[in-house]
Amino acid sequence: MSDDWSAWEPEEPPDGFADRVAERARAEATQRTASGSLPPARPMRRWRAAGFAVALAAASAAALLLRGSSLPSASAGDAEAKNREEIILGPRAIAVLEPGARITWRGDHVTQARGNVFYRIEPGSTFSVETAAGDVTVKGTCFRVKVREETQMNGRDMKAGVLGAALGAAALVGVYEGKVALSQPKGGSVDITAGQSAVADSRGVRANGSLDDGNRAFADGSSGKDEPLLAANASLADSVKVYKTRLELIEEEKKKLEKDLAAAQDKLAAAEGGAQLGGAKKSEFDLGEDDWKQLAKQGQVKARYPCEPKPGDYGPKALDKMGLRPEDGKTITSAFAASQKRRWAVIRPLCAQALGGALDVADKIGEGACIAVVQTIANQKDSAGADEGIRRAAEIRAGLRPMPGPDEQINSVERMMLALTGEAKTIEGELTKSLGPDDAKRVIFGDDEGCWKNNGWGVGPRASGGPQN
């Protein structure tokens, strides 16, 4: 029979197994010290069919333990297992390391850096296992700890819509006999008894059901029936990254083109006395009803809304250059903060809905990426409906159809476009009360005033031409 035990996937030992193995290992450690050799290993028993799978795994683990440790008993040390390996951690503890596992220990404290380790602890003073994800505290029990790095998207994360987030470390603890406590400094603590499991990761510490349930949930992969969903979400994660990069590049290019256009208009106005432009030039985002009607004919919308102000955007020097008072800075930044709050109140739930209900993911990726996600998912589900949402938003701004009520059912693209396209005029109305109409317009539509997002979307006119009900 082959001794290549690494071919077996480790399964959970039966009740009382660890006690019997530990007693035998201590007895043979004493014999080994006296004689300098080991007695032959006991042949494996035959197990009845009802318990064959568990018995086979237990017998293989027992054979490893009965061969004797590859390391002597020591009160301190470190080990990294290339093969399945048993280590006696001083007088009270035995650890079985699966390939790739790594631990260091000193007295009754073990640090498990990674991998899958089975522990048997004799009753006595407190024994602890420290991991990067959480700490395990025991007084005498039989349990397993699995530690992995959460640096890549796993099956559970993709189902939840976590877009490639780096989550640090995660640890699963399963208890076969006795009771342990799994804890984090800021993530709470949970007691685990025999037959139960718990997990510690970036989300905190929580019970994870039975041993089998815990192992399934902790697995990096997923069942075959979930593979299409996982592939789709992985593709979506990649798309979001691409869209964010493209948006940043487009934003930079738009700013450059807007400056070039402004310079050209200034030169033309100076050369022709301003007659060609009818006086001061008007921002393409300073849209009235007639402007919106032209956009609606082409199935287009435009939106200008503020970024989060940077230090100095509306400081004393900037305000003085704009001809405004120092106290106007607070008025402007307050109006911008209110704008961000209004927009996010609409976009955040739409983004979470597109990601399967993951509000925490929406918070992580932010407004710019969420706008791309909402439009992308809407186009994948109903391209014609997403296009119609843009056309309807333009027609509402043009006064060609009424504004929908707060409880009226409209698609996600239309709701998002209405939230974005109305912000410039809303802020203008708020600032006019304090700054006056000219200064309010200059703050919002000026070429070099603070940080602004300028976006446009176009899907073309309807085949029928006019608005549809």
Image (cartoon, rainbow, N blue to C red):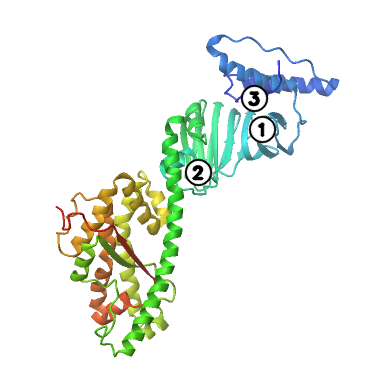
* Residue depicted at 42% across the width and 36% down the height: 228
Q: Is residue 211 depicted above or below 445 in this figure?
A: above
Nearer-the-camera pick, 7 or 18: 7
First in residue order: circle 2 vs circle 3: 3
Viewer-nearest of discs 1 and 2: 2
Q: Amino acid at mark 3?
A: Ala
Q: Is residue 414 visible?
A: no
Q: Amino acid at mark 1?
A: Pro
Nearer-the-camera pick, 426 or 18: 426
What is the quadrant of residue 309 in the picture? Answer: bottom left
Does residue 375 appear to the left or right of 399 in the view shown?
A: right
Nearer-the-camera pick, 68 or 285: 285
Nearer-the-camera pick, 141 or 203: 203
Count numbered badges in the picture: 3
Q: Is residue 385 depicted above or below 205 in this figure?
A: below
Q: Secondary structure at mark 2?
A: loop
Q: Amino acid at mark 2?
A: Met
Residue 88 percent coordinates (x, y): 72, 30
Residue 364 percent coordinates (x, y): 43, 53
Q: Is residue 239 depicted above or below 128 in this figure?
A: below
Alpha-carbon distance for marks 1 and 2? 23 Å
Residue at mark 3: 7
Q: Secondary structure at mark 3?
A: helix
Viewer-nearest of discs 3 and 1: 3
Residue at mark 1: 99
Residue 367 percent coordinates (x, y): 37, 58
